[in-house]
Image: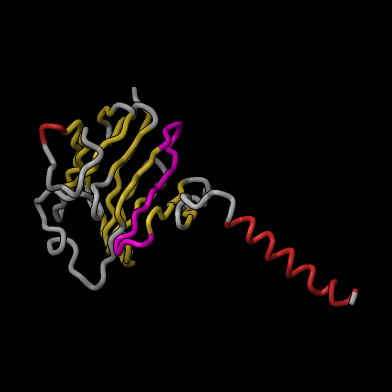
Amino acid sequence: MKIVQFLLYPSLLTLALACGQTSSGNEDQPVGVTLDTTAAGDSAAYTIRVLDAEKPSPRKEMKGKIGATEITVNYGSPSVRNRVIWGGLEPYGEVWRTGANEATSIQFSTDVQVEGKALKAGRYGFFAIPNQDKWTLIFNSVADQWGAFDYDATKDVLRVDVMPQSKGENAEQLDYQIEGNAVILRWEKLAVPFTIAAAQ
């Protein structure tokens, strides 16, 4: 009997611990957490949390730091699914929500410079006008809205122009990353970086 108890004890302990973890009151926590790293290998550079995995384009949140500034991007993460993305699903020359479903929002914990232009600390709706050779990135004062259907250019706080970069490898899902002093929108074979610096 003692031998049976000895063999059963580790299994019962594991089961008890698992039950304790699932009943800890954290049911509202994100579905999953993915830790991504920068090219420099800094494992604390940014994290991507899956907030709602049930949607075809999961809702995600990227959090990270550049200098003393904490940056949070909340976005829907669509997949390529063998579609033509740039100039197809996402037409050139039109305002795009930089994600899927609800418009993407971006938040800065301190005053910053985006591509050398001043932007106050706060949370903004984040839109873009993609083109083949140049993208216009838009920071709008209305952070919570569905898509770009109610986008109002008169509420724009800042616009900056950046150059998209072609990548050889395909990023099936849209994600945001931090690398060095830049936030990068990455989807399909395109990367769109924009630099963040401390306010002056």
Compared to 29, does 107 lie above or below?
above
> Furthest-top residue in view?
200
Q: Residue at x 20, y 49 (%)?
A: 97
> How many marks are shown on the rendered structure?
0
Residue 77 lies left or right of residue 150; in this view the side is right
Image location of residue 128, percent across then percent down:
19, 46
Residue 200 lies left or right of residue 47; in this view the side is left
Magenta segment boundaries in residue numbering: 53-70
Compared to 136, does 19 lie above or below?
below
> Furthest-right residue in view?
2
Would residue 64 be counted in the magenta stretch?
A: yes
Q: Residue 195 sits in which quadrant?
A: top left
> Furthest-front residue in view?
1
Q: Residue at x 45, y 47 (%)?
A: 46
Front one among 152 and 69: 152
How has the structure been colored for display?
secondary structure
